[in-house]
Image (cartoon, rainbow, N blue to C red):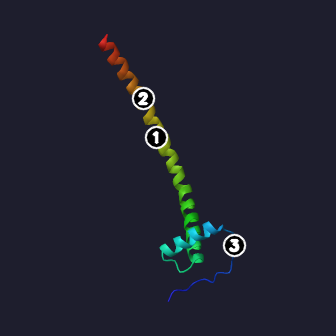
Amino acid sequence: MAFHKPRTRLVNFRLTEEEYETLKSAAENRGARSISDFARAAILSSVATQDSGASHGQGLTGIDRKLEEINVAVERLAGMLAMRMTSNAA
């Protein structure tokens, strides 16, 4: 039998009727026991994703830098090829 920590903290926020119906529908579609369970899982999942995204962000910065270097090299080669084709055509 799994041990569950008692939940003693409360988070409260207001929704429009449309937001509530959207949340209720999403909770039902995903088989959540309640809107509260669904909202808790969604928020905690979002926080976990953002935390792991921060560490991945550093790796993505390196990839972005490398892609920019490749882009510069390709543009330089394209320019050299264009100059060569123009000189051969003349």
Q: Residues within 10 Å of mark 2 (few under 14, many from 20)?
A: few
Residue 73, position in %: x, y? 42, 31
Write down the residue under mark 2. 75
For the residues labelled 3 and 2, the Cα–Cα distance comes to 54 Å
Residue at the front extreme of this rendering: 17
Write down the residue under mark 1. 66
Q: Are marks 3 and 2 in contact (CB under 8 Å)?
A: no
Q: Secondary structure at mark 2?
A: helix
Marks 3, 2: nearer the viewer:
3
- Residue 78 lies in what quarter of the image? top left
Write down the residue under mark 3. 12
Q: Amino acid at mark 1?
A: Lys
Q: Is 6 displayed left or right of 52 in the figure? A: right
Q: Is residue 7 above or below residue 15?
A: below
Q: Residue at left 33%, top 13%?
A: 87
Residue 28, position in %: x, y? 51, 75
Q: Secondary structure at mark 1?
A: helix
For the residues labelled 1 and 3, the Cα–Cα distance comes to 45 Å
Residue 20, position in %: x, y? 61, 70
Q: Earlier in the sequence, mark 1 or mark 3?
A: 3
Q: Residues within 10 Å of mark 3 (few under 14, many from 20)?
A: few
Q: Are marks 2 and 1 in contact (CB under 8 Å)?
A: no
Residue at the bottom extreme of this rendering: 1
Q: Nearer the viewer, residue 27 or 54?
A: 27
